Image: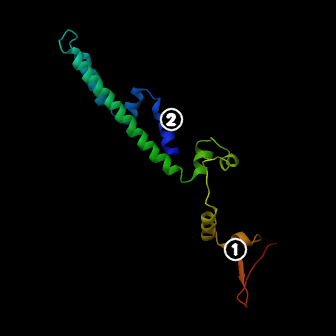
């Protein structure tokens, strides 16, 4: 949802000429503009042809805007796999302390703890001295804390 809202914010207010350039459809758009310029304003079907060409131009812009939004939304969604990197470092919209207080941030602490232990091992968290564990002859495990 955040990714889609961000993409909407970027492209909703962008003007048509910037949209067609960003989407790479400026040639197609320019061809229709040229056809409009070539229309004979005295022709009986001028209004109908003009409306049809303007409709085609509008469709090009609308399609380009939607494609850009979809692409940007996908890009942001990938970036949001690391919300700290995205919101704090890339966008600069939050300080890390404020980000974790934001209502849209939810952390599955159980999953995070399991991932941390799987990555660094339990000794990393229990042995504040050197992060090592020592297996005793009795089978117990000791952790140095000073």
Rendered image quadrant of residue 62: top left
* Label 2 vs 1, first from the N-terminus: 2
1 vs 129, left or right, is left
Residue 137 picture location, percent across and down: 73, 91
Rendered image quadrant of residue 90: top right
Residue visible at 34% across and 35% down?
Answer: 63
Up/down of 61 relative to 67, above or below: above
Instruction: Specify the label residue 123 is tagged with.
Output: 1
Frontmost of labels 2 and 1 is 2
In the picture of the structure, the residue carrying the numbered disc 2 is: 9
Element assignment for label 2 = helix
Extreme residue toward the front, this view: 103
Looking at the figure, which quarter contains the C terminus? bottom right
Element assignment for label 1 = helix
Frontmost residue, 52 versus 136: 52
Extreme residue toward the top, this view: 42
54 vs 111, left or right, is left
Residue 132 picture location, percent across and down: 71, 75
Residue visible at 49% across and 51% down?
Answer: 78
Task: Tell me how far mark 2 sits from mark 1, CA to CA.
Answer: 46 Å
Residue visible at 73% across and 87% down?
Answer: 136
């Amino acid at each position: 949802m955040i990714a889609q809202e961000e993409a909407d914010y970027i492209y909703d207010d962008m003007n048509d000429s910037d949209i067609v350039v960003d989407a790479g459809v400026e040639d197609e758009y320019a061809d229709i503009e040229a056809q409009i310029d070539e229309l004979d304003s005295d022709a009986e079907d001028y209004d109908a042809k003009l409306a049809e060409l303007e409709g085609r131009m509008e469709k090009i812009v609308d399609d380009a805007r939607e494609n850009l939004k979809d692409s940007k939304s996908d890009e942001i969604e990938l970036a949001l796999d690391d919300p700290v990197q995205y919101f704090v470092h890339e966008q600069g919209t939050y300080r890390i302390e404020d980000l974790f207080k934001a209502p849209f941030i939810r952390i599955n602490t159980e999953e995070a703890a399991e991932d941390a232990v799987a990555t660094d091992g339990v000794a990393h968290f229990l042995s504040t001295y050197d992060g090592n564990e020592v297996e005793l002859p009795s089978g117990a495990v000791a952790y140095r804390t000073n």
